[in-house]
Amino acid sequence: MKIQVQFLHPAARLPWRAHEGDGGADLHSVEAVVIPPGERRDVGTGLALAIPSGHAGFVQPRSGLAFRHGISVVNAPGLIDAGYRGEVRVCLHNGGEAPFTVAPGDRIAQLVIQAVETPAFDAVVTLEETARGAGGFGSTGDRQG
């Protein structure tokens, strides 16, 4: 599969995988941005993508930025639908203790392209019973075995 990429900014760079077989491709900033501690900023990549129908792009944090600086993607993973043709922008959050500076060319997030199902939804009066039922957050407790 090949994905067409349109450069919307002169500093834009193609998404890049550090190693053959990597699932994520690095996205680079085209903007200089300072993110104060506890705040978030929208950072441009200067790219528009033609993701094929039946697929979606998922923007995820870079583990090194998250571990070393507390930088994460606010809505991780950010979703890029197949029909979207605007600029891919990344909403970064600084969970660290110091301001974080993003420079043009910096790797700011990773892009993962995945096949997705697009089922139809059918309204029903009741759902099939399961062993879990309506148990949600924390419903399994610390039980083992």
Image: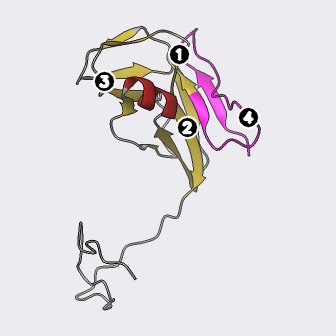
Residue 76 drawn above or below residue 88: below
The quadrant holding residue 139 is bottom left
The span from disc 2 to disc 4 (Cα, nearest Å) is 14 Å
The span from disc 1 to disc 2 (Cα, nearest Å) is 14 Å
108 to the left or right of 93: right
The span from disc 4 to disc 3 (Cα, nearest Å) is 28 Å
What residue sits right under mark 2 in the picture? 111
The span from disc 3 to disc 1 (Cα, nearest Å) is 18 Å
65 to the left or right of 50: left
54 to the left or right of 35: right
Q: Residue at x 28, y 72 (%)?
A: 142
Q: Position of residue 50 (x, y in %)?
A: 59, 38
Callout 1: helix, strand or loop?
A: loop
Check disc 1: other Cα within 10 Å, few if <14, some if 14-19, many if 20+. Answer: some
Name the residue type under label 2. Leu
Tell us which disc is closer to us: 2 or 3.
3
What residue sits right under mark 1 in the picture? 106
Name the residue type under label 4. His
Check disc 3: other Cα within 10 Å, few if <14, some if 14-19, many if 20+. Answer: some
Callout 4: helix, strand or loop?
A: loop
Name the residue type under label 3. Gly
Q: Using the rendered image of the protein, determine whether residue 62 is visible from the camera's viewpoint.
A: no
Residue 16 drawn above or below residue 100: below
Callout 2: helix, strand or loop?
A: strand
Between 142 and 130, the one nearer to me in the picture: 142
Q: Looking at the image, tell me whether mark 2 or mark 3 is earlier in sequence order.
A: 3
What residue sits right under mark 4 in the picture? 19
